[in-house]
């Protein structure tokens, strides 16, 4: 399935900000009909306007992905409005930045309900429609932290590990069915999204992504690519993701000790912590502000990942190189 050849119907959770917001714009650029799911109305309205400005169509549906009933109702509304869903992208999450012993049971449950079960409910709603048609793709937006956990993010890391396990099991079932419904995972690096301004944090200083940091558009392009090439089970985005996942395979105990020494300071700026938190309610509904796709680290973020560019263009580069070598060989033969 190549989305750029004809308009497709796409659902994106967590579409009001960050990666979901950037992915919505990316699909909109290719003329997609995009169902936007998130809790915050201000962010949803702004995301819908951006999708339509980019050339797509948008339907904003306030949805708490922790509720299967809300996710199912949103899927029904998207299909009533746009027709059959071709692609479902699970992005939505929330978290708590704190040592494990400082997180309450209710906080842990809420973050897990959104970040893990939100992916399960989205996948369930998508498959309910895709399997009878034998058509569709599900893209799970993951993280390097789904394979290599770090301190102060036990909620997020645990949920992302769970998404990997759930998706791997699902993939084997889809392979057994021998049909045309696909699922793939895109493991992301540190990204400059608003989460670090509104995540519930008990750290003394403001949270930050661990450098190197990439702009959310890098992630969005990878999500779009994965939706077009879903038979590959897992994509790694960014040299830091590649290094982290390979390091976890080769030197897990060494990484444990390194993170124990450096994992606290590297996840905090020198600025005092703020009071904003989106765990229970969306921040943009509280202040009416649209937070957009980017966080506050634009000055430190990369707009391009050389690793991902090479990954995305590997086949065209190989074809071009083959053509050059063939022409050289032909010229040599003539002489």
Image: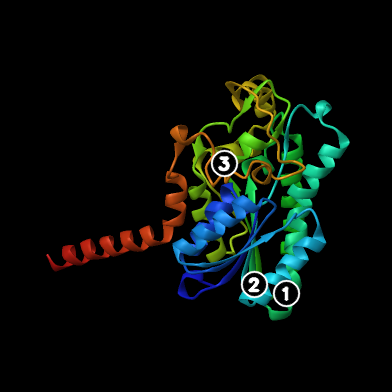
Residue 67 in the image, given as x and y percentages of width and height: 81, 56
> In the image, what residue occupies the spot 56% across and 63% down?
227
The residue carrying mark 1 is 129
Nearer mark to the viewer, of 3 and 1: 3
The residue carrying mark 2 is 85
User: CA separation, marks 3 and 1?
Assistant: 31 Å
Asked which secondary structure carries label 3, the reply is: loop
User: CA separation, marks 3 and 2?
Assistant: 27 Å
Residue 269 in which image quadrant = top right
Asked which secondary structure carries label 2, the reply is: loop
Residue 206 in which image quadrant = top right
Q: Earlier in the sequence, mark 3 or mark 1?
A: 1
Residue 87 in the image, given as x and y percentages of width and height: 61, 67
Q: Earlier in the sequence, mark 2 or mark 1?
A: 2
Q: Is residue 282 left or right of residue 68?
A: left
Tell me the quarter of the image containing the N terminus: bottom right
The residue carrying mark 3 is 193
Asked which secondary structure carries label 1, the reply is: helix
Residue 218 in the image, given as x and y percentages of width and height: 49, 48
Q: Nearer the viewer, residue 292 or 14?
A: 292
Judge whether 102 appears above or below 109 on screen: above
Q: How is the image coloured?
A: rainbow
Residue 189 in which image quadrant = top right
Q: Residues within 10 Å of mark 2 (few under 14, many from 20)?
A: many
> In the image, what residue occupies the spot 68% across and 36% down?
199
Judge whether 82 appears above or below 97 on screen: below
């Amino acid at each position: 399935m190549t989305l750029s050849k004809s308009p497709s119907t796409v659902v994106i959770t967590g579409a009001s900000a960050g990666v979901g917001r950037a992915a919505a714009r990316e699909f909109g650029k290719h003329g997609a009909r995009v169902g936007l799911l998130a809790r915050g109305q201000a962010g949803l309205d702004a995301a819908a306007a951006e999708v339509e400005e980019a050339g797509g169509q948008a339907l904003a549906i306030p949805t708490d992905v922790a509720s299967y009933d809300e996710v199912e109702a949103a899927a029904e509304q998207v299909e009533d409005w746009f027709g059959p869903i071709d692609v479902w992208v699970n992005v939505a999450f929330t978290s708590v930045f704190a040592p494990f012993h400082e997180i309450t049971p209710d906080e842990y449950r809420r973050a897990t309900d959104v970040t893990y079960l939100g992916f399960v409910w989205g996948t369930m709603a998508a498959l309910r429609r895709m399997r009878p048609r034998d058509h569709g793709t599900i893209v799970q937006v993951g993280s390097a932290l789904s394979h290599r956990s770090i301190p102060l993010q036990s909620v997020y890391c645990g949920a992302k590990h769970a998404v990997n396990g759930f998706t791997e099991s699902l993939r084997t079932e889809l392979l057994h069915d021998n049909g045309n419904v696909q699922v793939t995972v895109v493991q992301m690096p540190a990204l400059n999204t608003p989460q670090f301004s509104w995540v519930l944090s008990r750290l003394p200083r403001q949270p930050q992504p661990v450098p190197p940091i990439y702009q959310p558009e890098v992630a969005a392009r990878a999500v779009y690519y994965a939706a077009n090439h879903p038979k590959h089970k897992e994509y790694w985005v960014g040299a830091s993701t590649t290094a982290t996942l390979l390091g976890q395979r080769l030197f897990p105990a060494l990484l444990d000790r390194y993170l124990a020494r450096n994992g606290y300071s590297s996840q905090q700026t020198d600025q005092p912590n703020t009071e904003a938190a989106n765990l229970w309610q969306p921040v943009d509904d509280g202040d009416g502000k649209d937070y957009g796709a980017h966080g506050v680290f634009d000055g430190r973020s990369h707009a391009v990942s050389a690793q991902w560019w090479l990954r995305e263009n590997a086949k065209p580069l190989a074809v071009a190189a083959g053509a050059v070598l063939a022409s050289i060989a032909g010229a040599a033969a003539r002489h």
